[in-house]
Image (tube, rainbow, N blue to C red):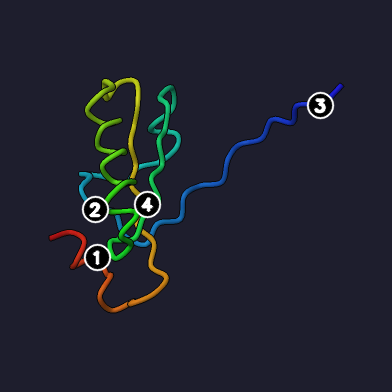
């Protein structure tokens, strides 16, 4: 029989929050399903498929039930893919 080990998830380490009045935390989202969409703005697949799917999830479910959180990552084109560009 497998053993279930309960432990708290790590705290999110975020460089900068956009489009939210205050930083998000797992504790502030407790009780909701969290959909985490990791993306890059210069990734064609992310823009054409991932982000529209996250938008549909956000539009389908009540905010009291589901939180859709976008996690923008920077792997390449560092200067073109910064906060100023994605917050526009």
Identify the residue at the far left of this view.
Answer: 88
Circle 2/circle 1 CB separation < 8 Å = yes
Q: Which residue is mark 1?
A: 83
Residue 61 % position (x, y): 28, 22
Q: Which mark is residue 18?
A: 2
Query: In this image, 69 relative to 52: left or right?
Result: right
Contact between marks 4 and 3 (CB within 8 A): the answer is no
Instruction: Tell me which residue sits at (58%, 40%) in the image.
Output: 9
> Who's the residue at 40% across and 36% down the image?
35
**Within 10 angstroms of label 2, few (less than 14), some, or many (20 or more) residues?**
few
Image quadrant holding the C terminus, namely bottom left
Q: CA distance from mark 4 to mark 3?
A: 31 Å
Q: Is the residue marked by circle 3 packed among few (<14), some (14-19), or many (20+) residues within 10 Å?
A: few
Q: Earlier in the sequence, mark 4 or mark 3?
A: 3
Q: Secondary structure at mark 4?
A: strand
Label whose residue precedes the other's in the sequence (4 or 2): 2
Position above or below: 16 against 76: above
Residue at position x 20%, y 48% in the image: 19
Horizontal side of 73 relative to 2 (left or right) equals: left
Tag 3 residue:
3
CA separation in Å, label 2 and label 3: 39 Å
Quadrant assignment, res 31: top left
Query: In x, y percent, where is residue 33?
Result: 42, 27
Q: Which residue is mark 4?
A: 71
Q: Going from the N terminus, do you reach mark 2 or mark 3 first?
A: 3
In what element is the residue under mark 2? loop
């Amino acid at each position: 029989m497998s053993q279930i080990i309960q432990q708290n998830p790590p705290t999110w380490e975020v460089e900068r929050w956009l489009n939210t009045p205050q930083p998000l935390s797992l504790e502030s989202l407790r009780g909701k399903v969290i959909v985490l969409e990791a993306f890059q703005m210069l990734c064609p697949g992310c823009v054409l498929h991932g982000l529209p799917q996250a938008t549909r999830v956000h539009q389908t479910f009540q905010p009291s039930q589901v939180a859709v959180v976008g996690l923008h990552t920077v792997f390449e084109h560092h200067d073109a893919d910064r906060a100023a560009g994605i917050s526009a």
